[in-house]
Image: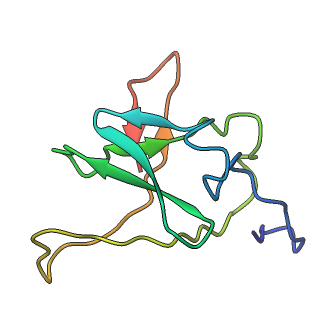
């Protein structure tokens, strides 16, 4: 991962490759399971989503700074009825004591 200070940061996600199962991941208003890919790796399967922001999540509070810009990358596979208008997004959930939860 790169950040706007010009340096290369380490991966801020714990267990980003699911080698530890779903450890450190939470299913946000959906169902999630782990599948072995047959080549020694794992991947997560997320089902029963009804909103775009639902999916696997991980708390990264304390691992990022508001003053930096981060680059996000992921490998995603969609199955089932997929339409050309379907998009894949990474969503940032911002929570604050003084404001309602926002999804960006």
Identify the image quadrant of residue 32.
top left
Q: Residue at x 74, y 51 (%)?
A: 12
Compared across the picture, whether 96 is left or right of 1 comes to left
Q: Picture coordinates of residue 45 (x, y %)?
A: 36, 53
Q: Is residue 93 above or below residue 80?
A: above
Q: Residue at x 19, y 43 (%)?
A: 48
Q: Is residue 91 above or below residue 63?
A: below
Identify the image quadrant of residue 81.
bottom left
Q: Is residue 86 above or below residue 104?
A: below
Q: Residue at x 65, y 55 (%)?
A: 16
Compared across the picture, whether 95 is left or right of 29 comes to right
> Furthest residue to the right?
7
Q: Picture coordinates of residue 1 (x, y %)?
A: 75, 69
Foreground residue among 31 and 50? 31
Identify the image quadrant of residue 8.
bottom right
Q: Picture coordinates of residue 40 (x, y %)?
A: 63, 67
Compared across the picture, whether 97 is left or right of 102 comes to right
Q: Is residue 101 above or below residue 50?
A: above
């Amino acid at each position: 991962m790169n950040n706007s200070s010009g340096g290369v940061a380490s991966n801020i996600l714990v267990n980003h490759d699911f080698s530890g199962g779903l450890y450190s991941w939470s299913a946000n208003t959906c169902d999630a399971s782990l599948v072995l890919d047959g080549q020694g790796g794992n991947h997560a399967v997320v089902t029963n989503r009804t909103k775009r922001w639902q999916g696997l999540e991980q708390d990264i509070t304390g691992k990022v700074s508001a003053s930096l810009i981060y680059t996000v990358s992921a490998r995603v596979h969609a199955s089932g009825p997929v339409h050309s208008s379907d998009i894949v997004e990474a969503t940032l959930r911002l929570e604050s004591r003084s404001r309602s939860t926002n999804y960006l």
